[in-house]
Amino acid sequence: MAATGAGIGALPHSEAHYFNSYNHHGIHEEMLKDEVRTKSYRDAIYNNKHLFKDKVVLDVGCGTSILSMFAVKAGAKHVIGVDMSTIIVKAREIVEANGMSDKITLLQGKMEEVELPFPEVDIIISEWMGYFLLYESMMDTVLWARDKYLRKDGKGLIFPDKATIFMAGIEDGDYKDEKIGFWDNVYGFDYTPLKVTALTEPLVDTVELKAVVTDPSPVITFDLYKVTVEDLAFKMPYHIPIRRTDYVHALVSWFDIEFSACHKPVRFSTGPHSRYTHWKQTVFYLADVLTVQEGEAISGVLSCKPNAKNRRDLDIEIDYKTETDNAGRAAEGHCTYTMA
Ligand code: SAH
């Protein structure tokens, strides 16, 4: 296949690393087997054939071309799939094997560099979400594609178009002891310098619903029709009501996704109350253990921005404070994390 652009080898190291990670079929297998993810896209597309019929569709980061093929089945006139990773070579064979080569054009290259065969598209489909929603910063690329290629008359559609980050507080004493407390005494030695490091790394893992001691609290919603790359560096106040008298060792975060252009909106959640997804949840251990009572709240500010050295990494800061009348249990703190 003729590759557009200079190929992954010519990219800066961190970018090459990112795109190389999508070369192997294993990562695509994990995503395809995530049924919450893949069936939500399939439902959003198949149940809205009236929106896809005869439309030109752009699949940003097409991977194995699954979303492109959904769009063709829903009646799209033509789909352009773009991916920088070499998986697109296989995508081309898959499209051929499914008799869709005349309907799908696959371009290998960076979305920001390839030249599309159409000046405008009617619909953008993309699965760009990373851990903690924003890790990997692929939303930047979708916004770039939106601004350059989505039809300018306001009738263009984006699938999905809404993403909300949530937070809640969890009781996670045993695991915190095992992961963080471990460094206090390693074969009789003080290893606390590594404790500091461990505390600054958010942990991507599944959280059991019974560990959640608060209500879920929405922190920020991105509307993909309006959001700009600058908005992806944000500082948002949050307020998490306590539902159960307990201890809080960490804040857990997840995101919900919505396809609101659908006749009946399709949504899925990656939270602890929902079915497993490969995004799991993201846990931020706090420096303190908060002692909280039903009716109180944890409040503070969540800040997030792309790392200055590697835009795909995230610098996250959490200010927290227990809202309580009990001075003995009042606590506040500030933690910084890097997702790399
Ligand atoms: N759409 C597929 C794959 C999603 S994973 C599916 O739903 O299964 C995201 C894909 O986007 C990866 O294959 C990655 O290589 C590609 N990608 C990310 N940023 C890109 C960019 N700027 N240009 C081209 N491809 C990109």
Image (cartoon, rainbow, N blue to C red):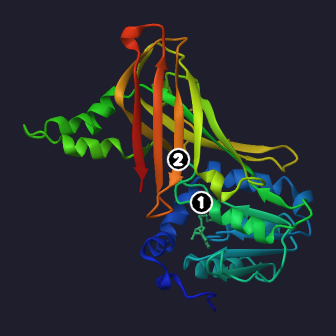
| Amino acid type at image mark 1 | Leu
Secondary structure under tag 2 reads strand
**Pointer 1 residue Cβ closer than 8 Å to ligand 1:** yes
Marks 2 and 1 sit apart, C-alpha to C-alpha, by: 29 Å
Quarter holding the C terminus?
Answer: bottom left
Residue 69 shows in this picture: no
152 horizontally vs 35: left or right: right
Which of the two labelled residues, at mark 2 and mark 1, occupies the earlier sequence position?
1
Rendered location of residue 9, percent (x, y): 47, 84
Residue 281 shows in this picture: yes
Name the quadrant containing residue 42. Answer: bottom right
Mark 2, residue position:
304
Closer to the camera, 69 or 262? 262
| Amino acid type at image mark 2 | Cys
Rendered location of residue 14, percent (x, y): 44, 71
Name the quadrant containing residue 284. Answer: top left
Residue at the extreme left of the image, as rendered:
188
Q: Which residue: 61% across, 78% down?
A: 88
Quarter holding the N terminus?
Answer: bottom right
Near mark 2 (Cα within 10 A), the count class, few <14, some 14-19 or many ≥20, is some
Closer to the camera, 146 or 102? 146
**Pointer 2 residue Cβ closer than 8 Å to ligand 1:** no
The circle drawn on residue 32 is 1
In this view, 57 is above or below 255: below
